[in-house]
Each structure stands twice: as C-alpha cells, then as structure tokens.
Amino acid sequence: MQTLIIIDHGMIIYDGSLSEVKSRFARSRVIFFQVGSPMPELFAELNRTPGIRLTLQNDQEFSVAFDRYEYTASDVVSRVMRHGEVIDFRMEDANIEQVIKAVYDGNLDLNQQAQ
C-alpha cells in the first residue's frame, strides 16, 4: 500500500492511503483517440452528452474526459468505435496532482466523510 501524507503550514492535513484518495476524489479519466477519418457526428453527440468533455486536437485526434463513476472506459471507447475506425487510443487515470492542488487551493477537504 502506498501512503500519502500532505503537510500544510507544518501540520499534517492528510495521512492515509493514496488509492483511497484516488478512488474518492480523483473521479476524472481521459481517453486520447487517434481515428482514421473525421467523426463530426460523434463530436456532436459527445458535446451533447452530460458528464463528458470533448477536446479536439485536430479532425482525427481528440480526447474525451469523463467521470469514472458515471461512465466506464468501455462505454466511451464503444461509443467512439461505433462511429468509425480507431487507429490508437490511450487512457490516463486520475491525476493525484490535481487532487493535491485542490486541497491547497481550499477546494477539497480530504478528511470529509465518504458518501
């Protein structure tokens, strides 16, 4: 088990499991896609879908960010594959650095009770 200790102004504000912090607070995942041809219908569909954020690099490269408690990676990949050829994709899990930044910015209390 990996332990995470966060110190703020000399005080320990969190001492616990890294995996617990990721599972409770780092909800976002991102999948980066490279496709064989532009997919304007998919882009329109994703832009209308709550809880999904589409970012276009160009007509054939884009990323889809999603809440892993609302959608699975399989849901997202399947949706894209229904619209055309996927040449390659990669997924990035939750970013612990963003969680820690939110703590220091005062936007997140790691000691709050799990819901």
Image: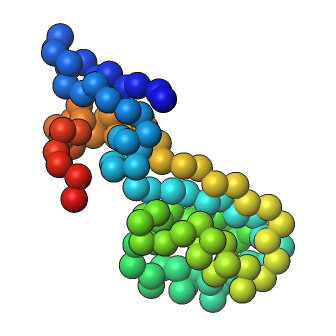
**Residue extending furthest toward the top:** 10
Counting from the top left corner in percent of width and height, residue 3 is at 40, 25
Q: Is residue 26 left or right of residue 8?
A: right
Colour scheme employed for the rendering of this structure: rainbow
The residue at the point 61 percent across, 60 percent down is 31
Counting from the top left corner in percent of width and height, residue 96 is at 43, 38
Query: Where does the C terminus fall, quadrant-wise?
Result: bottom left
The residue at the point 48 percent across, 29 percent down is 1
Q: Quadrant of residue 81?
A: bottom right
The answer to whether any part of residue 23 appears in the image is yes
The residue at the point 28 percent across, 25 percent down is 15
Q: Nearer the viewer, residue 17 or 48?
A: 17
**Residue extending furthest toward the front:** 1
Q: Nearer the viewer, residue 1 or 24?
A: 1
Counting from the top left corner in percent of width and height, residue 48 is at 45, 84
Q: Nearer the viewer, residue 115 or 40?
A: 115
The residue at the point 51 percent across, 56 percent down is 29
Q: Is residue 34 left or right of residue 31?
A: right
Q: Quadrant of residue 41?
A: bottom right
The answer to whether any part of residue 57 appears in the image is no
Q: Is residue 66 left or right of residue 5?
A: right
Look at the picture and state if 104 lies above or below 20.
above
Look at the picture and state if 3 lies above or below 30.
above
Q: How many marks?
A: 0
Look at the picture and state if 12 lies above or below 111.
above
Counting from the top left corner in percent of width and height, residue 56 is at 60, 65
Look at the picture and state if 100 lies above or below 72.
above
